[in-house]
């Protein structure tokens, strides 16, 4: 909305440089930050959109707990990737396993353990989408 603020965060300066033109067009701020230690106050945000984040984290539950810290109660977490898990696994030359962080069971457990309630899960061929609400 007109009073909203969009902040894009990434761990690498290279990814922030890639995002700079889109961020400028969207009037979004860019922040160099680790998802496991965000430089934001508790309950400072209404929602988080995480594209391709979870598979890059060494400890899913720790990062999800940190994401929950900065989201107000009832706020949302959107996990997204423009390819489904099977397509990503094939692209990287590996097979999917049921214990991967984005598999339905592990994701449901890690979100619940870190202050989220998983409300939607869609692992399609052409995208991955999960939605969680802050408890």
Image: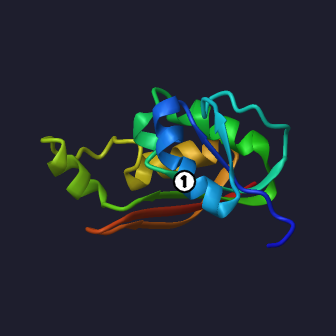
User: Residue visible at 65% across and 62% down?
Assistant: 26
User: Residue visible at 76% across and 40% down?
Assistant: 69
Expressed as whole percent of the image width and height from the top left, the position of residue 122 reads 41, 68
Asked whether residue 46 appears in the rendered view, the answer is yes
The residue identified by callout 1 is 21
Asked if 2 appears above or below 70 in the picture, the reply is: below
Query: How dense is the environment of label 1, judged by Cα within 10 Å: few (below 14), some, or many (20 and up)?
Result: few
Q: How many marks?
A: 1
User: Residue visible at 84% across and 46% down?
Assistant: 43
Which secondary structure, mark 1?
Answer: helix
**Is the C terminus in the top left, top right, bottom left or bottom right quadrant?**
bottom right
Expressed as whole percent of the image width and height from the top left, the position of residue 74 reads 79, 61
User: Is 135 left or right of 44, judged from the image as shown?
Assistant: left
Asked whether residue 12 appears in the rendered view, the answer is no
Q: Nearer the viewer, residue 134 or 9?
A: 9
Q: Residue furthest bottom?
A: 1
User: Residue visible at 48% across and 49% down?
Assistant: 107
Expressed as whole percent of the image width and height from the top left, the position of residue 39 reads 76, 31
User: Is 122 left or right of 16, judged from the image as shown?
Assistant: left
State the scheme by which the image is colored: rainbow
Expressed as whole percent of the image width and height from the top left, the position of residue 70 reads 77, 43
Q: Nearer the viewer, residue 92 or 73?
A: 92
Q: Nearer the viewer, residue 103 or 13?
A: 13
* Quarter of image, res 25: bottom right
**Is the N terminus in the top left, top right, bottom left or bottom right quadrant?**
bottom right
Q: Residue furthest left?
A: 93
């Amino acid at each position: 909305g007109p009073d909203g603020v969009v902040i894009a965060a990434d761990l690498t300066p290279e990814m922030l440089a890639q995002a700079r033109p889109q961020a400028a067009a969207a009037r979004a701020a860019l922040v160099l930050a680790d998802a496991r230690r965000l430089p934001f106050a508790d309950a400072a945000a209404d929602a988080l959109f995480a594209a391709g984040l979870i598979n890059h984290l060494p400890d899913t539950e720790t990062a999800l707990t940190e994401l929950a810290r900065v989201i107000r109660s009832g706020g949302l977490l959107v996990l997204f990737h423009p390819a489904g898990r099977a397509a990503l696994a094939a692209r990287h030359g590996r097979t999917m396993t049921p214990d991967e962080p984005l598999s339905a069971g592990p994701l449901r457990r890690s979100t619940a353990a870190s202050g989220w309630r998983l409300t939607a899960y869609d692992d399609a061929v052409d995208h991955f989408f999960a939605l969680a609400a802050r408890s």
